[in-house]
Image: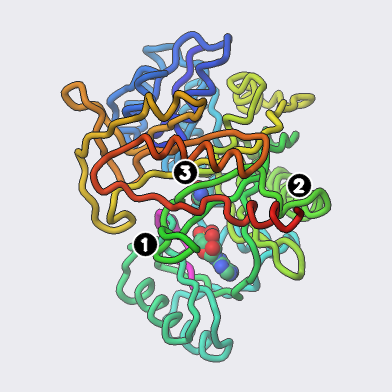
Amino acid sequence: MNVLVIGSGGREHALCWKIKQSPLVEKLYCAPGNGGTSQVAENVEMDVSEHQEVRNFCRQKRIDLVVVGPELPLAQGIADELEDDGVNVFGPSYAAARMESSKIFSKEFMGRYGIPTAKFRIFTDIKKAEDYIMVKGAPIVVKAFGLAAGKGVVVAETVREAIDGARAMLVHKEFGSAGRQIIVEECLRGEEASILVITDGETIVPLATSQDHKRVYDGDQGPNTGGMGAYSPAPVIDEEIYKEIMTKIVEPTVRNLREEGISYKGVLYAGVMLTADGPKTLEYNVRFGDPETQAIIPRIKSDFAELLMAAATGDLKGKTVEWDERESVSVVLASGGYPGVYAKGKVITGIEEAEKNGAIVFHAGTKWENGSLVTNGGRVLNVTALGETIEEAVWLAYEAVSKIHFDNMHFRRDIAHRAIHRAAARG
Ligand code: AMP
Ligand code: GLY
């Protein structure tokens, strides 16, 4: 089959890398791709927000399966349009993508079916929001309802901070229409984990658990980023908690969507907080996590392209994933300054050397320029290694990182610290 992957990050390089390994795949394209995807797929220069261009391309190249990486095209209905043309799409419809594109939709959905989540209220009026925040007190969380590239959430330690956040969204329109309405919710305490499953709307095939590191500096300090590293599995999720997450969150989500007439196919990603009262849903994403995917995918032994096609065509029943039992760690190498202002165009060296001991380097913000690989984004590379223990995986990942260089490179040195502490405590 011919496959098109949409997107340009580390997640998409990992997707392409694994899809390419399938004997079922004849041609693999990535639009627009990056410096890494061009080594395993043919990059297609295309504005993927122009859905007509994508449709034309699929027709010309006889694409059998489109795998959509990021949320935005899904929220804009690309799956529906391509399916109208008879193309199989791994990724949910416009209606189903509201689970991520509208926090009001997803919170009300969870409310309707008793899916555990933080208690919340919705506001469009700043005065009412302020009154509510003052009555509830801090800590409290304020969120823009729409897509805000992971930036529309204020976890406020003080009432002042919460009110400033609400004003930034409702009054100063810092997130444009995504902040037209806000959610003010209870602040949950606990450890976070990412639960990703593949579904065709009926059958659910779980992927391995993982944990992301959202803050830019070691010790979870500094501003939030898209994610500075991940590891899989997440040992904080033992069998019992896992079962609870599946029966109280994931299964009722897929089932109730279906019962509402929304057939969900693709990845469903539940961000959960493991609170003292059990797991609660922080958010849903309708796509693979980035950088979780770069840690999870190298552990998959089965034919990934076949699995994605089965989900896209409603044929997941009986399918399973075979896992590499080793643990994996993926460290993000970022441009200094990220998530704020950073430079681009810095020459990257050492990737081949880094891969000599078996590490895998997935590209995120890179491109080829006059024969050199240069930086082209905030998150530049993801260095993934597998090990028999989490300590070994961490050691191998950082050894590979030490070979790579570009000016002003920044990375966290404590990826997987929670798992390491847990392993140390076990002895
Ligand atoms: P979201 O986009 O909803 O996942 O929020 C981004 C991040 O904000 C999450 O990964 C959490 O770290 C944090 N967060 C969101 N909601 C809450 C909450 N109710 N309580 C505590 N932290 C939260
Ligand atoms: N790693 C967080 C996300 O993909 O949203």
Per the image, the residue denoted by label 3 is 331
Mark 2 vs mark 1: give the one in front.
2
Residue 34's mark? none
Q: Are marks 2 and 1 in contact (CB under 8 Å)?
A: no
Q: Is 356 on the left or on the right of 236, as rendered?
A: left
* Position in image of residue 400 (x %, y %): 44, 35
Q: Which residues are magenta?
A: 142-149
| Category of crowding for the residue at label 3, using alpha-carbon neighbours closer than 10 angstroms: few (below 14), some (14–19), many (at least 20) | many
Residue 251's mark? 2
In front: 39, or 141? 39
At a point 74% along the width and 46% down the height, the residue shown is 259
Q: Earlier in the sequence, mark 2 or mark 1?
A: 1
Provide the major secondary structure of the magenta segment.
loop
Per the image, the residue denoted by label 1 is 177
Q: Helix, strand or loop at disc 3?
A: strand
Could you tell me the amino acid type at mark 1? Ser
Mark 3 vs mark 2: give the one in front.
3
Could you tell me the amino acid type at mark 3? Val
At a point 67% along the width and 48% down the height, the residue shown is 234
Task: Choose top left, top right, bottom left or bottom right for residue 200.
Answer: top right
Q: Is residue 144 magenta?
A: yes
Q: Earlier in the sequence, mark 3 or mark 1?
A: 1
Q: Helix, strand or loop at disc 2?
A: helix
Q: Helix, strand or loop at disc 1?
A: helix
Most distant residue in the front direction: 427
For the residues labelled 2 and 1, the Cα–Cα distance comes to 32 Å
In front: 339, or 395? 395
